[in-house]
Image: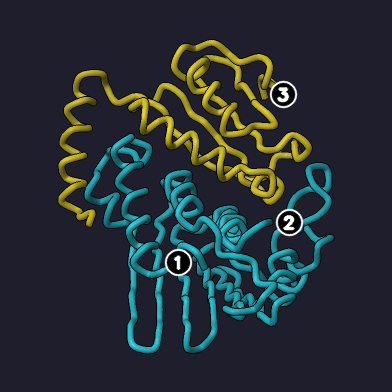
Chain colours: A cyan, B yellow
Amino acid sequence: MQDISLHLLDIIENSVRADARHIKVRVIHDVPENLLRLIVEDDGCGMDSHTVEMAQNPFYTSKLEREKKVGLGIPLFKQNAEQCNGTFKMASEPGFGTVMTVDFQLDHIDRMPLGNLKDTLLGAIIGHQEIDFYVNLIYQNRCVQQSFLFDTAAIKEELGDIPLTYPDVIEYIDQSLYEGIQNTNMEDV
Amino acid sequence: MKTLADLKKIREKAQEEMKLRGGNVRMKIVVGMGTSGIAMGAREVMKTFLEEIANRNLTDVLVTQTGEKGLSSMEPVVDVIEDGKDKITYGNMSPEKVKKVVVEHIVNGRIVSDFVVATGN
């Protein structure tokens, strides 16, 4: 993976496979704290503590051995965070869901860039119409705080039976995310 | 700034159109978004499908994402599913190939056999 937003997409797909109905994505760009934090929270099937442990092992996969022998998504993300003085935490409860918190040292020379957050979110939101996404981007500097909220439940309610793949809706979501990412300085992080 | 009022307009326009042609989904596109797919550029493939749909105003096509399916060596992988026809699986996709598939297959109904890696289930 070349950037954090690609890892985010991978993590979102994990939540989808866990049958989540709601996925909450928070990205915090905190300059005074020298921190770039990503939090993904879902209400999927969750994992017991043993599975949480195993999921961080590259030779563990929840799929059949016939299909796939390794599970690199989580281990690679963990490695990429820890390589640059960051931390990777995963908490889960069977039946309740999973929360993943990944911290990066903002100014670490080896930190991978955040990358194209907009395309990650756009694809995930439109590619999983059945799931409600709640996106919160926060930029914090010494004297300013900028926050962007995007809740797909409100959009779906407004649209009624019009699918998110309707051309004008794609443009609407694309444009909204673009503006939010600009306003919270998430573009070239 | 985009507001919910903009959505109301979109909804009215879309409902008018649906009255004219009926609200069916003609084709479903499924982009493989597992770890290996993402590493090989599946996000850009997804993005290009969405762009093409918006630019060509294709209102009867649905795009979704799915996990890994055991075709890791041919990622990014895309399925095109149409009612009453065999499922077509395209492999080693790129934004350029997506544009071709949209023009040939999605719009004109001609399968791009050069990119096909599997058919049926």
- Pointer 3 local density, CA inside 10 Å: few below 14, some 14–19, many at least 20: some
Question: How far apart are the alpha carbons under marks 1 and 3?
Answer: 38 Å
Question: How far apart are the alpha carbons under marks 1 and 2?
Answer: 33 Å
Amino acid type at image mark 3:
Val
Q: Is residue A183 left or right of residue B43?
A: left
Residue that appears at 75% across and 74% down: A53
Asked if both marks, 2 and 3, belong to the same chain, the answer given is no
The quadrant the N terminus of chain A occupies is bottom right
Amino acid type at image mark 1:
Met
Which label belongs to residue A186? 1
Residue B39 horizontal/vertical position (percent)? 68, 49
- Residue on which disc 2 sits: A62
- Pointer 2 local density, CA inside 10 Å: few below 14, some 14–19, many at least 20: few
Amino acid type at image mark 2:
Ser
**Pointer 1 and pointer 2: residues touching (CB < 8 Å)?**
no
Q: Helix, strand or loop at disc 1? A: loop
- Residue on which disc 3 sits: B117
Q: Is residue A118 left or right of residue A160?
A: right
Residue that appears at 68% across and 29% down: B91
Q: Is residue A30 left or right of residue A18?
A: left
Q: Helix, strand or loop at disc 3? A: strand
**Pointer 2 and pointer 3: residues touching (CB < 8 Å)?**
no
Q: Nearer the viewer, mark 1 or mark 3?
A: 1
